[in-house]
C-alpha cells in the first residue's frame, strides 16, 4: 500500500492534534521514539514519516503576518506547477475561502505552500480541505475559521457562509 505524506499527517491529526493538545508546538513530543514506533506499526514507512515531520516543521516555522482581507484585492495568478497540481475546484475553493474571510492572503499562500509540499502529482479538493484545516489549526487567532472549516470537512452538507 502506497502511503503519502498526507496519510501520515491525517493519522497524526486524527490521533494527536486536538485543541487541548500542545503536541503541534512541542516538536520533541512529536518526533519522540514511541510515536515513531506507533506510526511504523500503523504501516507508515520511515521515509513518509520523516517527510510528514518535515512538513509539520515547515508549517510551524511559517506564520504569515496579519493581512487585511480585501474583496477588491489583487487576483492570485497561479504558476504552472500549481495549475498542474491544483484543479479548478481547488483554486475556486481557495478563492471562496479568501472572499469570505476564512483565509487571508498570507494564509492562502501558506496553504498553497503546504499543499505543494505534499509531494503528490495531483491534489484533490478533499486533500486541500485537510491542508487548510491543518494550516488554520496552526494559526493563532484563527479559531473561528478553523471551526467553520472543521464543519465543512465533517458535515454531510456544507454550511453556507454568511
Image (cartoon, helix red, strand yellow):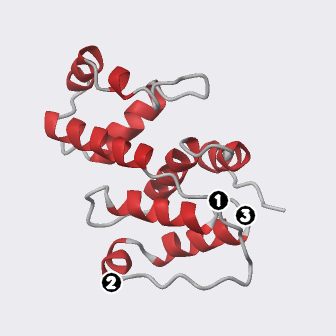
State left or right for residue 161 relative to residue 127: right
Residue farthest top in this picture: 34
Which residue is tagged 3? 101
Say which mark, if any, is on residue 66. Answer: 1
| Sequence-wise first label, 3 or 1 | 1
Q: Answer yes or no: do the residues labelled 3 and 2 have beta carbons within 8 Å?
A: no
Picture quadrant where residue 121 is located: bottom left
Q: Which quarter of the rendering shows the N terminus?
A: top left
Q: Residue at x 72, y 63 (%)?
A: 101
Q: Is residue 67 or residue 31 the one in the foreground?
A: 67
Q: Is residue 85 above or below residue 132?
A: below
Q: Residue at x 32, y 38 (%)?
A: 8
| Residue 57, horizontal then vertical, whole percent | 35, 42
Q: Is residue 88 above or below residue 17?
A: below
| Sequence-wise first label, 2 or 1 | 1
Regarding mark 3 in the picture, which secondary structure is present there? Answer: loop
Which residue is tagged 2? 80
| Sequence-wise first label, 3 or 2 | 2
CA separation in Å, label 3 and label 2:
26 Å
| Residue 39, horizontal then vertical, whole percent | 26, 25
Q: Residue at x 44, y 65 (%)?
A: 112
Regarding mark 1 in the picture, which secondary structure is present there? Answer: loop
Amino acid at each position: 500500500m502506497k502511503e503519502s505524506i498526507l496519510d501520515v499527517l491525517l493519522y497524526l491529526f486524527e490521533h494527536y492534534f486536538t485543541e487541548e493538545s500542545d503536541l503541534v508546538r512541542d516538536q520533541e513530543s512529536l518526533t519522540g521514539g514511541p510515536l515513531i514506533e506507533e506510526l511504523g506499526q500503523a504501516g507508515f514507512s520511515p521515509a513518509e514519516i520523516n517527510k510528514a515531520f518535515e512538513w509539520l516543521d515547515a508549517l510551524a516555522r511559517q506564520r504569515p503576518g496579519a493581512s487585511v482581507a480585501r474583496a477588491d484585492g489583487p487576483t492570485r495568478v497561479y504558476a504552472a506547477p500549481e495549475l498542474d497540481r491544483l484543479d479548478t475546484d481547488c483554486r475556486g475553493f481557495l478563492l471562496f475561502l479568501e472572499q469570505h474571510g476564512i483565509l487571508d492572503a498570507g494564509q492562502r499562500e501558506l496553504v498553497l505552500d503546504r499543499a505543494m509540499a505534499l509531494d503528490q502529482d495531483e491534489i484533490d479538493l478533499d486533500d486541500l480541505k485537510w491542508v487548510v484545516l491543518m494550516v488554520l489549526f496552526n494559526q493563532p487567532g484563527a479559531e473561528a475559521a478553523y471551526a467553520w472549516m472543521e464543519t465543512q470537512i465533517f458535515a454531510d452538507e456544507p454550511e453556507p457562509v454568511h
